[in-house]
Image (spheres, coloured by chain):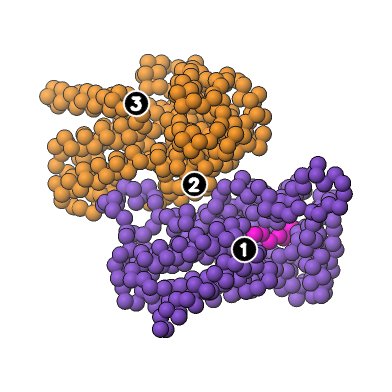
Chain colours: A orange, B purple
Amino acid sequence: MTEIVRNTSRKKDFLVEYFRTQMRTDPDMASAVAAIRTLLEFLRRDKGETILGLRESLKWATDCLTEVDSSVAVSSGGELFLRFISLTSLEHQDLSRCKKVMEERGELFLEKISLSRTKVAKLCHTFIKDGAKILTHSSSRVVLRVLEKAAAEKKRFTVYVTESQPDTAGKQMADALRRLNVPVTVVLDAAVGYVLEKVDLVIVGAEGVVESGGIINKIGTYQMAVCSKAHNKPFYVVAESFKFVRLYPLNQQDVPDRFKYKADTLRTVSDLSDEHPMIDYTPPSLITLLFTDLGVLTPSAVSDELIKLYL
Amino acid sequence: MPGADKEADLTERIEAFLADLKRGGCGTGPIRGSGETARETTALLRKVTAQARWSSAGDLMEIIRKEGRRMTAAQPSETTVGNMVLRVLKIIREEYARSRGSSEETDQQESLHKLLTSGGLSEENFRQHFVHLKANVIEAINELLTELEGTTDNIAMQALEHIHSNEVIMTVGRSRTVEAFLKDAARKRKFHVIVAECAPFCQGHEMATNLSKASIETTVIADAAIFAVMSRVNKVIIGTQTVLANGGLRAVNGTHTVALAARHHSTPLIVCAPMFKLSPQVLYGQFLRPHGLVFALTCTILSKVNVHCPVFDYVPPELITLFISNIGGNAPSYIYRLMSELYHPEDHDL
């Protein structure tokens, strides 16, 4: 019995270590991609005999990863991988052949999604005109890539970034933009309404895109969306397709607690009402367009995409 | 040599079409509606398919794309030309897939599902030669032409469901589709139409004349009176130049005013537009650059005055209630679906 426990804890350590290494070696990699890479490696080393056993161990592995990084992206990456396994296992009944096909397809899938940020940037940069003033929230690598592409196309624009408490991630975004020679101003989170009259468009990233077409993103995004609706400014979201997640929140309360707070907080704190949530939900009525590697989508098109995958 | 003659004839036809487009015509002479342009474009593309030299679907698509680029460059504001080229490209893809025997599913556009289950990064290169491909493509284009000819009638047929007796309907400028729509309803219902004249060309006057010839009670109002009169209007029915991919419209100048006034009074706004007007463009900022005309002001301040006369307006999808097209009525949020059925995403940039 102790053998099994030791084995399990060793497997868990390996998983967590691999995931952390992935995130460390390439800070530009999305956390969902790191999660999928880790799960693929886990698949390679798995010695299970049945497909059901494989699914069980993968579910367990995904749970371990969400304990390390409780973001929506890791959860959606894990679910996507599980779906990938189910679809592949339906085609091949023999486990060893199935595993080989899974490994090949897994590598292909990783290759494709590593190109997704470039695809998104290609679609979105045409919406940034010369002389535009852009407002963005916190630090998003996809938004950064879009702005890089627009700068490379010799467009002149200025950016306002919210500093985004409590981790002041906005300052990192501002530094990255300064390195690109883009004029950037860091504003307080409370100054969003003040700044919006000067701004032409708002571009934000997303940690997760939900079934209704709304998004889950760093706290403060909902506020920004409501203000831009009031000012009639277009609110664009840029996200890769692996962030589509099977949630349908109707309001802020519906977003599960495991996404709202960091993994450590969930473990240590008993009364969550004193904690500050890290994310919020923006409903689809406030979003103008979503730029994904599957194309430019209106919020109503997102559920179509999810249905195509999961049904 | 008959082959060379045919080719020369084809290039001559294409050149004549391009010259006509540049002048603002539609390919068969004086300025006419976009329906004629669409039909002319499709007929020309059918001729290209029949007479140009090609051995595989890939070659044909390249030829059509090349001609398509030339045609759209001649008159960028006439989007129906580009739309028809995209339709023909989709037809070629479908016929190729059918000849190969593969199901429709494999040639679907990008989706999460396809990302997960596809076996390889290699794409279709359309190099295989099929004997009957030419005949199949030409037959499909003929079907498309038949569809194009029936669009106005299909839309007009739906009129009785939407117009009731003793209603006051507002429209803007002149649209052949809306005219046919209203005339069809007038056969069985009695209603009143208010036409905004739509300066500076005042095409509303012609619309009003045509409607009154069909014994419909018509009133012409100035554009400035649109908001004032809106409180007494039951429905607003308009046509458009283009339907954009996000469900918005690119329509004649003044339409945005009507749409905002209708939203303010909670009046339904119905757009009658045939499917060939649906364009994969989403960017709406581009054409606010006025493709306009400058008036010959006969006064001395001419040198100090800039006259902007934009021809088109953008109407966002939130202001529109319903789209009536030849395939039925649809909400603006559904337009993206119709687009994915008509065009292939790889063709969106010609």
Where residue A119 appears, as percent x and y from the top left, is 41, 43
SS class, disc 3: loop
Disc 2 target residue? A296
- Which label is found at residue A176? none
- Chain-order first, disc 3 or disc 2: 3
Residue type of the residue flagged with mark 3 = Pro
Where residue A4 sits: x, y (%)?
14, 27
Q: Provide the residue designation for mark 3.
A: A27
Instruction: Please tell me which residue is depicted at 63% across the width and 36% down the height of the picture.
Output: A233
The reply, left or right, for residue A86 in relation to residue B135 is: left
Give percent across and percent down for residue A311. 38, 51
Chain under numbered label 2? A
Residue farthest bottom in this picture: B2
Q: Look at 18% across and 37% down and name the residue there.
A: A44
The answer to whether marks 3 and 2 sit on the same chain is yes
Q: Which residue lies under the disc numbered 1?
A: B22
Q: Amino acid at mark 1?
A: Lys
Pick the residue in front: A31 or B131: B131
Of tags 1 and 3, which is closer to the observer? 1
First to last magenta residue range: B236-242
> For the point 30% across and 32% down, which residue is it?
A35
Q: Nearer the viewer, residue B126 or A167?
A: B126
Marks 3/2: CA–CA distance: 27 Å
